[in-house]
Image (cartoon, rainbow, N blue to C red):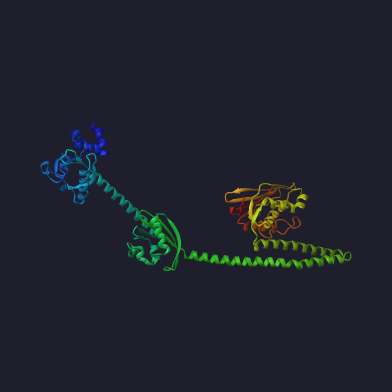
Amino acid sequence: MLNDQKTEIIYQKLSDSELAAISRREYKQEYRDFVDVLGGYLVCTTAAGQITHSNENFERAITFSKENLLGKSFYDLINPSHASKFFSAFEKAKRSSSEQAQKLEIKITANPLRAIDLAITLVPNGKSEVLIVGWDITEQKENERLGRLQLERVKTDSQKKAFRMLADIPDGIFLLDKEWRLLYVNREAERIARKKSTEIIGQHLWKLYPELIGTRIYSEYSLAMSSGKASRFEDFLPEFNAWFETNLYPSEDGLVVYFRDISERKKSQEELKRYAEELERSNSELEQFAYVATHDLQEPLRMISSFVALLSAENAGKLDASSQQYIQIAQESADRMRTLIRDLLEYSKVSSIKPVMQEVNCAEVVAIVLLNLKQSIDQQQAKILVKDLPVIRASGVQLVLLFQTLINNAIKFRSANTPEIVVASKADKEGIVISITDNGIGIAPNYLESIFKIFKRLHSRETYPGTGIGLAIAKKIVEKLGGRIWVTSEEGRGSCVSFFLPDKVFVK
């Protein structure tokens, strides 16, 4: 029975009710035996704190005999630094009922000094006596102290290793404690600050750099320290005439600051931005020039075509075969030039003229395109299947041009089989993809990207008429909508031209 209860008392000490039982002298000898066997201390005092009884464990701990202890004030045995805490608990125990124990840890002036875990309770015998039961926790406290020292030693060793690793990192690093004092500064941070670590370690950051108070840096550092959340920001510091990228990492000890000089990168970004603006302006001027040039070239070209036709009509039957051939060549060249100028004009319109954006039903657009291409569809006996298509925000005129170019190509570049074309769409995680699939001659893998370049032709003009501008126009229209276009193909088995449109233009 004693061993079973020993385990319980070791971990739980004595409950308030057990202390009350002792103080009422119930099961007096049994409970006192428990305390004695477990090495505990048991002391009774008067209301003034004078000792009236103590067990042998307590007497051995403080190297006093029972005779020397009787009548002695318990206060005289307490380490002075703990006297106030004991007095408060002792007085509270006297005012409380015998069922409520006051528990605390103190040190008594034994040799050596002992740490005691005490419970103080009132003895309800009408004499205002107080019962003190204690357990020696000196060894436990020493083990805890050694554990903390070992942890600090490991932490210190780890910090030293970390500091050695951080010393030569090409970016600046410094550590701050909760009071904004500098704990560590690596070599790059020294170089940027133009101060030796010996000059600034232990210094208050904002006293070193008072000019930063109220700036963005001050706000970001303060927010990271108070919120405990990591952050990143870029800022220009006039004091150093440089741009810095700073990363802040809060820790339980303070703040880790990791920063780098990004002045060169900022300079490159500014130059790139300036170059992009100049390029955009130049492209705009070129596009405007192309539009004006192609528009203005149409009139003289019409004159040339008209005079060649007039020359041919007036000299019908009078010219030899060679002269007639020359006139025919001139007429065909003028026709090709007219087609080229028309396509160039369409291309420049897409590039330079801001279209009117509105809700457009792609299914209705394709229906218009099929009417426009009815003659070709009938001639080639093409079968065209149109599946569900979306409503988007775009230029109706440009969408007609886009679908007409792609469907016309699917008809034009047919194989020996009857053309079969499918126009469909499918949802994408960031928008929608529309595709035009055919069973035509297909495209060799090495041309899948280059076909979208202006004037790029894969076949002779005699085999497949055209200017090589159509897909370039299609690409420009799709890109204006924030999308992209591509083609997949197997030579001899057909092609699939797809274009992606982002959510921002998708209506339903």
Q: For the point 26% across and 48% down, which residue is it?
A: 145
Q: Is residue 169 visible?
A: no
Marks counted in the figure total 0
Residue lying farthest to the right in this orientation: 317
Left or right of 125 in this view: 449: right
* Residue 36 position within the rendered picture, expressed as x and y whole percent measured from the top left: 19, 37
Residue lying farthest to the left in this orientation: 67
Q: Is residue 269 visible?
A: yes
Q: Nearer the viewer, residue 116 or 268?
A: 116
Q: Nearer the viewer, residue 53 or 193?
A: 53
* Residue 51 position within the rendered picture, expressed as x and y whole percent measured from the top left: 14, 43
Q: In the image, is residue 262 above or below residue 83? A: below
Q: In the image, is residue 415 above or below residue 244? A: above
Left or right of 79 in this view: 480: right
Q: Quadrant of residue 203?
A: bottom left
Left or right of 91 in this view: 502: right
Quarter the N terminus occupies: top left
* Residue 7 position within the rendered picture, expressed as x and y whole percent measured from the top left: 26, 36
Residue lying farthest to the top in this orientation: 1
Q: For the point 42% across and 62% down, which residue is it?
A: 217
Q: For the point 26% across and 46% down, which residue is it?
A: 143
Q: Nearer the viewer, residue 326 or 384?
A: 384
* Residue 321 position within the rendered picture, expressed as x and y whole percent measured from the top left: 86, 63
